[in-house]
Image (tube, coloured by chain):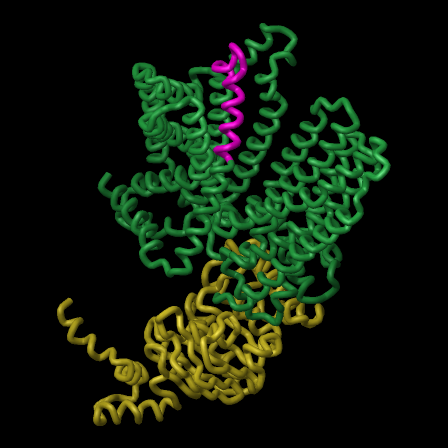
């Protein structure tokens, strides 16, 4: 389970996360939505130990990310929003490196590397330096690296950016398969269509505060309450209504 | 022109915003670095003042020697500037991260090139300027010049800087036209470093110190011939020297001529570079973006069996591969070799006749080796953490502790640094022919000191990491780099001070003093030595580890 209690993060005077409380059960795919600058990436960075919270607590699989970071990191995997990886390693070497960081036995590691490289159609590029990869190729390598140590919790920050349609579909199928096996997935995304199709629960954050959280149906009900039944079932409409983006329509008329 | 000004304004706005939105902590840190830089400049000023003042005292030859020395210093500045411009220009002109945005905008490539030319010249010149100013003020004080003289010389310095930048950038344009791929940068870096190392060795072998020692030359003719050597009017240092001397003596006619020659040469070369860039820059940039492909050396697992299978071993393997494949890093080893060669050459050439002089030099040699090692550590050890770059998230989000990360980086840096330190001390002591006591003392000290310097380098590198940089030189010249340099120089000086008493006592003992050793002082110095080194070994790594753990990424 991923659990946060009163999770707060401040950058000087700016509140990036404001007393966020969240519980995500094992095997859930949780979609984390919000406008730009809402606090999504900040939350992912705290969950994966890249950032320290200003207040509150986060536990991943029962491990407090601040007090037992190494234990928590052993069971988690991260796909960041920008796939920065070591430019002077080849794709295969990068995967070997990650496998060794997680102490996967060599034979198991090599077997999995071959499997994932083949799955993401990166066989032909595996011995080329990463500096020659496209954004999408780097994203595929990072995606393969996160699957390598079979984490129980996966954190994804805009995982579909840069992926071609075939790979994007493959990734969606992988998420569903992993979820069925009990892996918990926390996914930040702006691609509402993916959130709608893949996520079992969705949370919407705006200016650091979790404004709504639940299944798609629950979100629809809440949006209905706010608009006196005028909103459709489409997640995009619900999202725009709940984050107040509808106000922009007046401005757009001036274009 | 309008576009160039627009681009320059955006850069200037970026710099001023850095101050406008600085927090109190930022301003405090900036003030500290500013004061530290002022302290270093003041130290240089004192050094230059002493040299120039003593030269002026030399009967008859004083003024000639002074002009000669200035000319040689300016020639060194010029060569350093060209070298620095060549190295910097590749990252700035061809691989800067804002280039895709700028070149996709409706701005002529010429305007972008001019902006990048100015950026290169600025990045390459600021450190030379920090050395030039103390020199200028020292000269001014020795020759009692007035304020206007400083202004006139600084005006004259500008075309000198532009000339050096244009020469260096012209060279990199030429190379990019000849080898238009990413590999060019690697090839050019190796060329650049080899040329830099070669020039350094050449200058040293010419033994410029002989100009202040006429007796060393066999005949007056030889001496005069040597004095004439690097003063060709075809070289910019000749004209900058004229600018300085004519401004100091109020010879406005000569000042005007010298300023005109330098400005004209700088303008002509600048426009030549612009014309050359007009035809080649955009093509060169576009081709530089293409993948180089090519052969990637693979390493067998057996090659790296250092830490057994563990995350530490993984980091070691990764860092080794990155070092070997990054030309900008390993090519600098040529410079290290040149440095070691020149260092030993200097020791070899020292006129040492007596045992005591040899012992004194051997002792001071520990300090000199310490300063050399500190400079190497600034280049190779301090950036170790920052070089993780934007990929640091990989290690940070994995189950690897900051302790393990820093431990691997410490051990990886320690081995080659120890070899360098021991080779420097061992060979120089063999050349000097010192006794076993000094050999032992020097070797133990240099080994302990190397460990201290490496610990400080890794620890302070973790205290002041710069993950988001395009050029390794930016790490060295960062706030943390300057702090490291100051602390490491202080540390080496402290070690020498702590050992000085013991050395004096040993010499007195050799001279036959019956009670040469004053044991309380020996014990006190020993305790001080251990305390300073334990602090240097433990504290930086500990503070660095804690800082890295709480660092937002």
Who's the residue at 69% across and 48% down the image? Answer: B449
In x, y percent, where is residue B508?
A: 80, 34
Compared with B230, B341 (above or below) is below
| Chain A drawn colour | yellow
Who's the residue at 43% across and 47% down the image? Answer: B34
Quadrant in which the N terminus of chain B appears: top left
Q: Is B58 covered by the magenta stretch?
A: yes
Q: Main secondary structure of the magenta part?
A: helix
Q: Nearer the viewer, residue B454 or B27?
A: B27
Who's the residue at 45% across and 84% down the image? Answer: A30
In x, y percent, where is residue B304?
A: 72, 56
Left or right, residue B517 beside residue B277: right
Region in magenta: B44-65
Quadrant for residue B531, please give it: bottom right
Quadrant for residue B279, please give it: top left
**Which residue sits furthest left?**
A254
Who's the residue at 50% across and 32% down the image? Answer: B46
Chain letter for the green colouring in the rendering: B
Left or right, residue B98 beside residue A83: left
**Which residue sits furthest front?**
B515
Compared with B164, B536 (above or below) is below
Residue B177 visible in image:
no
In x, y percent, where is residue A118?
A: 58, 68
């Amino acid at each position: 389970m991923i659990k946060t209690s009163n999770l707060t993060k401040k950058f000087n005077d700016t509140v990036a996360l404001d007393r966020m409380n969240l519980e995500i059960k094992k095997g859930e795919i949780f979609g984390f939505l919000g406008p730009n600058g809402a606090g999504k990436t900040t939350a992912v960075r705290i969950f994966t130990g890249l950032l320290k919270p200003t207040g509150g607590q986060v536990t991943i699989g029962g491990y407090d990310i601040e007090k037992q970071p190494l234990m928590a990191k052993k069971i988690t995997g991260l796909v960041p929003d920008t796939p920065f990886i070591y430019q002077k390693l080849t794709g295969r070497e990068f995967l070997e490196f990650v496998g060794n960081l997680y102490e996967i036995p060599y034979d198991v590691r090599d077997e999995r590397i071959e499997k994932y490289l083949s799955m993401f159609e990166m066989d032909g590029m595996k011995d080329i330096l990463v500096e020659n990869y496209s954004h999408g190729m780097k994203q595929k390598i990072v995606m393969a690296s996160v699957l390598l140590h079979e984490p129980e919790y996966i954190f994804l920050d805009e995982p579909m950016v840069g992926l071609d349609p075939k790979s994007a579909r493959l990734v969606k199928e992988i998420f569903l398969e992993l979820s069925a096996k009990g892996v918990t997935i926390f996914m930040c995304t702006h691609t509402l269509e993916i959130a709608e199709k893949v996520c079992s629960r969705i949370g919407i954050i705006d200016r650091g505060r979790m404004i709504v959280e639940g299944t798609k149906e629950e979100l629809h009900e809440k949006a209905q309450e706010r608009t006196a039944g005028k909103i459709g079932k489409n997640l995009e409409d619900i999202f725009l209504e709940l984050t107040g983006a509808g106000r922009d329509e007046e401005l757009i008329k001036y274009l | 022109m309008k576009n160039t000004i627009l681009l320059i304004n955006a850069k200037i706005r970026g710099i001023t915003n850095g101050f406008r939105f600085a927090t109190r902590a930022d301003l405090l840190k900036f003030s500290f670095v500013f004061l530290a830089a002022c302290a270093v400049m003041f130290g240089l000023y004192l050094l230059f003042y002493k040299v120039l003042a003593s030269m002026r005292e030399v009967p008859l030859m004083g003024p000639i020697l002074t002009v000669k020395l200035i000319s040689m210093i300016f020639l060194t500045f010029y060569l350093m500037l060209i070298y620095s411009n060549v190295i910097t220009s590749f990252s700035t002109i061809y691989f800067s991260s804002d280039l895709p945005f700028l070149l996709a905008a409706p701005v002529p490539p010429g305007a972008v090139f001019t902006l990048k030319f100015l950026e290169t010249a600025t990045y390459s010149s600021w450190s030379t300027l920090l050395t030039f100013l103390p020199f200028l003020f020292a000269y001014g004080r020795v020759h009692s010049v007035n304020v206007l003289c400083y202004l006139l010389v600084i005006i004259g310095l500008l075309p000198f800087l532009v000339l050096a930048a244009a020469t260096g950038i012209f060279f990199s344009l030429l190379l990019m036209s000849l080898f238009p791929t990413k590999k060019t940068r690697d090839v050019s870096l190796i060329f650049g470093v080899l040329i830099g190392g070669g020039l350094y060795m050449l200058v040293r072998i010419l033994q410029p110190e002989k100009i202040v020692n006429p007796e060393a030359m066999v005949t007056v003719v030889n001496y005069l011939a040597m004095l004439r050597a690097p003063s060709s009017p075809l070289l910019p240092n000749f004209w900058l020297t004229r600018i300085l001397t004519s401004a100091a003596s109020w010879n406005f006619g000569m000042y005007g001529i010298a300023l005109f020659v330098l400005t004209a040469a700088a303008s002509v070369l600048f426009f030549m570079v612009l014309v050359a860039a007009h035809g080649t820059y955009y093509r060169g940039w576009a081709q530089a973006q293409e993948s180089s492909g090519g052969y990637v050396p693979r390493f067998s697992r057996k090659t790296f069996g250092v830490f057994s299978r563990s995350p530490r071993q993984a980091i070691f393997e990764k860092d080794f591969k990155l070092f070997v494949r990054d030309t900008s890093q390993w090519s600098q080893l040529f410079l290290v070799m040149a440095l070691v060669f020149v260092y030993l050459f200097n020791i070899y050439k020292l006129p040492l006749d007596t045992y005591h002089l040899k012992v004194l030099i051997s002792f001071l040699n520990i300090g000199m080796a310490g300063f050399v090692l500190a400079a190497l550590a600034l280049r190779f050890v301090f950036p170790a953490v920052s070089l993780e770059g934007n990929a640091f998230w990989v290690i940070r989000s994995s189950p690897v502790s900051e302790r393990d990360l820093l431990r691997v980086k410490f051990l990886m840096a320690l081995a080659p640094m120890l070899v360098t330190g021991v080779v420097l001390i061992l060979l120089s002591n063999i050349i000097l022919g010192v006794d076993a006591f000094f050999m032992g003392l020097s070797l133990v000290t240099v080994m302990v000191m190397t460990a201290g310097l490496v610990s400080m380098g890794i620890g302070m590198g973790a205290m002041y990491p710069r993950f988001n940089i395009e050029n390794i030189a930016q790490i060295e010249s960062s706030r943390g780099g300057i702090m490291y340099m100051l602390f490491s120089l202080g540390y080496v000086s402290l070690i020498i001070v702590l050992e000085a008493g013991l050395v004096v006592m040993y010499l007195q003992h050799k001279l036959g003093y019956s009670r040469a050793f004053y044991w309380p002082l020996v014990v006190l110095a020993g305790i001080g030595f251990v305390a300073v080194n334990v602090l240097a070994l433990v504290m930086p790594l500990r503070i660095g580890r804690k800082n890295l753990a709480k660092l937002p990424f």
